[in-house]
Image: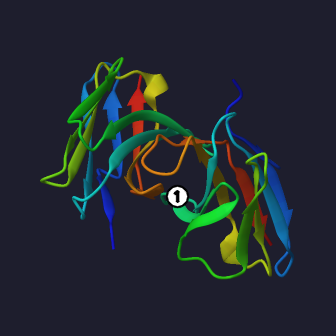
Amino acid sequence: KQEVTQIPAALSVPEGENLVLNCSFTDSAIYNLQWFRQDPGKGLTSLLLIQSSQREQTSGRLNASLDKSSGRSTLYIAASQPGDSATYLCAHTSGSRLTFGEGTQLTVNP
Amino acid sequence: DAGVTQSPTHLIKTRGQHVTLRCSPISGHKSVSWYQQVLGQGPQFIFQYYEKEERGRGNFPDRFSARQFPNYSSELNVNALLLGDSALYLCASSRQLGSYEQYFGPGTRLTVT
């Protein structure tokens, strides 16, 4: 059974700090790795999709990397802002089914 | 373009009742998936539909069923509701089957009392 683990479960940082969120998965035979953001009580917003043939993707202050051999992905957030406060979820794709981690709850303090 | 839409936004039901949740995918998307998210956990896969056929099912009891219509919208039905069914139900759409980016709706918050 494929499992996805996210570390840390919660993170609190001061505004302006660079930070890294970690995601690990047990089966390296994944297709894609997708990072999402979820605000309290809301749906999921797709941040970045890394296809299996890629090593990383960048969007603005966000950079996600994928290392299939080690079963790891990281989400790097540069110059964090209070508006980045949310839960960040990683999910891998097997076929069309997404398997999620339990998320990292990020708080960026002004 | 409109994103994935879901209705209703919130719903309160009593144990033993039945509920129907609705989802409209992004225009041009043919695949719809349903996920259950219990508070404090990541979403869990329930169903995937493509071209009106079930293409995947997660580890959920037969009380859960779904269907997809010719316009690619979808319904999730849950019978004989239990307290443990209280959750945020998320719908996601993608263009095709396979490893395409999935886009989520705002969810339906179901509370079973």
Q: Position of residue B53 (x, y in %)?
A: 66, 63
* Chain where mark 1 sits: B
| Residue B86 location, quadrant | bottom right
Crowd class of label 1 (few under 14; some 14 to 19; many from 20; radius 10 Å):
many
Q: Which image quarter is the N terminus of chain A in?
A: bottom left
Q: Which image quarter is the C terminus of chain A in?
A: top left
Depth check: give the residue in front, A78 or A94. A94
Depth check: give the residue in front, B112 or A99. A99
**Which three-letter amino acid code belongs to the residue tagged 1?**
Pro
Q: Position of residue A63 (x, y in %)?
A: 28, 28
Depth check: give the residue in front, B14 or B18. B18
| Residue A4 location, quadrant | bottom left
- SS assignment at label 1: loop
Q: How many marks?
A: 1
Give the residue pinned by disc 1: B43
Residue in view at x 81 percent, y 48 percent: B7
Depth check: give the residue in front, B75 or A25. B75
Residue in view at x 29 percent, y 29 percent: A57
Residue in view at x 72 percent, y 66 percent: B66
